[in-house]
Amino acid sequence: MLVSILCPDPYFKKRHHKRRVLRKPLVDSIVNNLVPGGKVFVQSDVLEVAMDMRNQLDAESDLLQHVNEIDPSVLCDSNGWLTSNPMGIRTEREIHAESEGAKIYRRLYQKQM
């Protein structure tokens, strides 16, 4: 089982952060329904959004592990972001952002067995 959240709307204004896709209720639902060994893949071209998603998922470290902790051969940069898309297929947003010179911030988690 794989849950992926790819380049969600950033909702930059503080008063609109409540509209961001990955919030505590969704994280709880994902964690509770994800089968052991299931994965959660998130990515964004906006660092603020990527950090927010990362913080939400890292808070569930008792159940979710970053894939690099499970398989050290998975390449990450010095900040723990995946260096390439593990899905093998890039989204239109990803292609556009990279063509504009933007960095894509990616994390892949796996539910503990």
Image (cartoon, grey):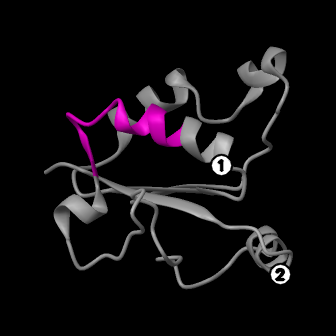
Residue 1: in magenta span: no
Residue 55: in magenta span: yes
| Disc 2 element | helix
On screen, residue 99 versus residue 24, left or right, reads right
On screen, residue 92 versus residue 63, left or right, reads right
Q: x, y percentage for residue 111?
A: 26, 49
Q: x, y percentage for residue 46?
A: 72, 51
Q: Which residue is outermost to the front? A: 78
Residue 95's disc number: none
Q: x, y percentage for residue 65?
A: 25, 49
Q: Which residue is outermost to the left? A: 113
Instruction: Name the amino acid, label 1.
Output: Leu
- Establish if 101 lies above or below 36: below
Residue located at (53% from left, 61% from top): 106
Can you tell which quarter of the image residue 31 is in? top left
What separation in Å lies between label 2 and label 1 (alpha carbons)? 17 Å
The residue pinned by badge 1 equals: 47
On screen, residue 109 versus residue 23, left or right, reads left
- Establish if 94 lies above or below 58: below
| Disc 1 element | helix
How would you rate the neighbour count of disc 2 (Cα within 10 Å): few for under 14, some for 14-19, many for 20 or more? few
Residue located at (80% from left, 68% from top): 93
| Mark earlier in primary sequence (2, 1) | 1
Read off the magenta span: 53-65
The residue pinned by badge 2 equals: 99
Q: x, y percentage for residue 90?
A: 67, 79
On screen, residue 61 versus residue 86, left or right, reads left
Residue located at (74% from left, 71% from top): 94
Residue located at (39% from left, 60% from top): 1
Instruction: Name the amino acid, label 2.
Output: Ser
How would you rate the neighbour count of disc 1 (Cα within 10 Å): few for under 14, some for 14-19, many for 20 or more? some
